Image (spheres, rainbow, N blue to C red):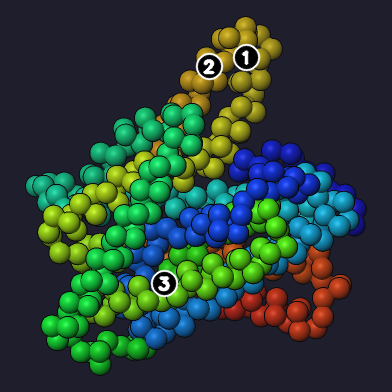
Amino acid sequence: MGEKKCDTIPLINPSPSSSTQGTASKLQTIGNIIVSIVGTGVLGLPFAFRVSGWLAGSIGVVITGLATFYCMLLLIQCREKLASEEELKETTTYGDLGCRCMGKPGRYLTEFLIFISHCGGSAAYLVFIGQNLASLFKLHGLTIASYIFLLVPIEIALSWIGSLSAFAPFSIFADVCNLLAMVFVVKEDLQQAIGGNFSFRDRKAFTDNLGGLPFAGGMAVYCFEGFGMTLALEQSMRERRKFPKVLAMSFTWITLVYILFGIFGYMAYGDETKDIITLNLPKDWTAIAVQIGLCLGLAFTFPIMVHPVSEIVEGKLKKNIWFEKLRNNDAEDSITRLEKLGIYMGRAVLVIVLAVLASFVPGFGVFVSLVGSSVCALISFVLPVSFHLTLLGSSLSLWQKALDVFVLVWIAFCSLWYI
């Protein structure tokens, strides 16, 4: 294979190169996989089950989980193929792999999709916080968009903090609040079941509206986000040959939890299930504390989600002709101050743009499903399969090629159905 010239600056900070021994144990890797995949999307699953039916939703989650797992393995196979041909000495990110497979267009396409997906995820955070705050504090004249814009000054200030590690505790805090919200929903379901407030037969297994199936599918795909971290997760593991087994174990448990939570949430609230399940929680102090905690955790985690977006914008900004002229004409300390000012202004503008985007979103569930069925589907399924066929196509068996082509055709069909 001829060597393709690629830029060396990845969208996401590189993890240790393939020649570096990872340090994460099996248990640590499982934890990293869960943190990378499980996010706020899980709180929209009960609504997806309401739209599709509990059995159809469960089948959709299983298929999505299997497809994501399969495509993650394809991505690792592609990296190993290039490593065996000494084409991958410094390749550590998804964008690097796209570059090696398809040249610079492959890098640009991969990183553009990651850029868009992080923009979508960041906007979804703001929508989630806005909807929850609007349900808790019903102040006169304040809409969901109002609460989103009230967050802007806070998020701008947080985006100026240089170290992302400072936000790690808040990310863990948000995950804990996520878990508590799920516990509240299960508790509510059990109370209603014991009290005889609903009948299992009243909950649909399959929806009468077939148009709801792709909506639920998009939500399921979004819930398995984090695909761009596949190579970094595999490289971080001490015993990398065991990664497929660890990944399979993690996906099994994540899929099972998703299914159970989706079913429990739908069973508890039925046709009253809202696109964010926390909006259905009773207005007692414990549930309100969980909602506020979840909003605080996500508000402080927002800079982590938006960081890859900031990184690519700042990379382009530093290559601007204006900055190049300054480097040739001005003193070094002046350049540093101007660059910092440009970076701070760029981050502020980015937060404002994302807030404006979020203010036009009609609802968390609709937006998340759209992102999942479009950008996330391309990142998680289309690109890995395309890379796999490009790199290993000649050595694949007929059934392997057929399976890859089936994934592409199925994703295309579902996307058209969604439209």
**Residue named by callout 3:** 257
Relative to 388, is 302 on the left or the right?
left
Q: Of callouts 2 and 3, which one flags the residue occurring earlier in the amino acid sequence?
A: 3
* SS assignment at label 1: helix
Residue drawn at x 47%, y 83% as measured from the top left:
59
Quarter of the image holding residue 334? top right
Q: Which of marks 1 and 3 is in front?
A: 3
Relative to 149, is 222 on the left or the right?
right
Vertical order, 292 against 26 (above or below): above
* SS assignment at label 3: helix
Dot 2: within a 10 Å radius of its alpha carbon, few (fewer than 14), some, or many (20 or more) residues? some
Which residue lies most toward the left here? 140
Vertical order, 210 against 33 (above or below): below
* Mark 2: amino acid: Leu
Which residue lies most toward the top here? 331
Relative to 214, is 391 on the left or the right?
right
**Residue named by callout 1:** 326
Marker disc for residue 338: 2
Residue drawn at x 55%, y 54% as measured from the top left:
28
Q: Of callouts 1 and 2, which one flags the residue occurring earlier in the amino acid sequence?
A: 1
Residue 170 rendering spot, x and y as whole percentages: 38, 43
Relative to 108, is 122 on the left or the right?
left
Q: Are marks 1 and 2 in contact (CB under 8 Å)?
A: yes
